[in-house]
Image (spheres, grey):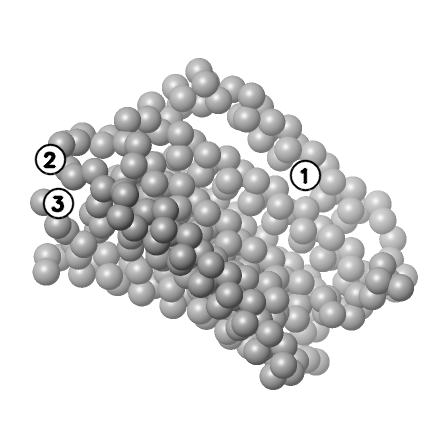
Amino acid sequence: MTDLLYNNQHIYLFVALFLLFFGIAGVVCRRTLIGMLVSMELIMNGAGLNLVALNRFVSPENGYGMAFTLIIMGIAAAEAAIALGIIMLTFKKYGHIEGGDLKEMKD
Amino acid sequence: MTVGEIIFLITIVATLGGAAMAVLSGSIVYAMMGLVTTMFGIAGLYVFLNSPFLSMMQILIYVGAVSVLIAFAVMLIGPLYRKPKEWTTVGKFVAALGVALVSLFMFVRFVMETFGDTLPQGVPLAENPSFEITTKEIGRLFFNNLVLPFELISLLVVVAILGAIMLALFSRGNK
């Protein structure tokens, strides 16, 4: 029973690592703000998967990793709500949501 | 290879393929569908990690709430068809790939050096036959040990809702 594929810890860690990889690439190269938000959700999900996998394999006697994954879900939902509010405001003010063209605070 | 392993591989392929689709596709709607696919894959991985409650919460919160929120934003923010292409230049793509690869390399080194040799290859199920953190135990953990983070999360959600309402209703744009 111990050599099944889904009882291997490293697979979960590497899946989370590739989620982080795709998330960072998306945050850097996406043009619109919604695309950046989607990539950030990918990063947060990678973090949650890491927490649950390490909780399962390293310290299986308590459930702190799962509890903090639930907290991460709450934070991600709040972040998505507030970020979409800001995106709507940006669209109302500027007429587009291109991340590269928002230069008002840069000047 | 058992049936469970085949389903596990399908789940991993769904997760990584959805993530690639969320990043590399040209349209935002396809990116959102890729995000939904990734969320379903991660919910499946949570099932394989013996935590079905988290899996259900993942589907409820991400697939049910966050994706619908993003879909409404895509519907309200329009028209996006004027600029259908997401990619700007090749240089930006190369820069993104470089940053992501450097971070990937760093974290692979980190994982390997931290967990490579010293960590046991997972706690075997024979020694630890019942990894069953049930929903009841998670609830007891929240209300015994993690009361302050729980309350702070509720406060954060309330502030986020009020802030989103304030941003959406009471600020005026230039149009």
Q: Residues within 10 Å of mark 1 (few under 14, many from 20)?
A: many
Between disc 2 and disc 1, the foreground one is: 2
Q: Tell me if residue B57 comes above or below residue A104 in the rendering.
A: above
Q: Is residue A92 left or right of residue B46?
A: right
Residue lying at 43% horizontally and 45% vertically, measured from the top left:
A48
- What percent of the width, then of the height, locates residue B34? 45, 65
Q: Which residue is mark 1?
A: B160
Q: Residue at x 24, y 30 (%)?
A: B132
- For disc 2, the marked residue is B126
Q: Image height check: is A76 above or below B86?
A: above
Residue B121 appears in view? yes
Distance from disc 2 to disc 3, alpha carbons, whole Å, reads: 7 Å
The residue shown at (46%, 62%) is: B104
Q: Is residue A74 above or below residue A17?
A: above
Depth order, front residue of B173/B150: B150
- Give left or right: position of B94 versus B171: left
The outermost residue toward the top is B144
Disc nearer the start of the sequence (2/1): 2
Q: Amino acid at mark 2?
A: Ala
Chain hosting mark 1 = B
Residue B22 visible from this viewpoint: no
Q: Position of residue A74 (x, y in %)?
A: 54, 38
Q: Amino acid at mark 1?
A: Ala
Host chain of mark 2: B
For the N terminus of chain A, which image quadrant? Answer: top left
- From the top left corner, tell me how far across and down residue B134 is, in percent: 29, 28
| Element class at badge 1 | helix
The residue carrying mark 3 is A2
Helix, strand or loop at disc 3?
loop
Pair 3/1: label in front:
3
What's the amino acid at mark 3? Thr
Q: How busy is the neighbourhood of tag 2: few (under 14 within 10 Å), some, or many (20 plus)? A: few
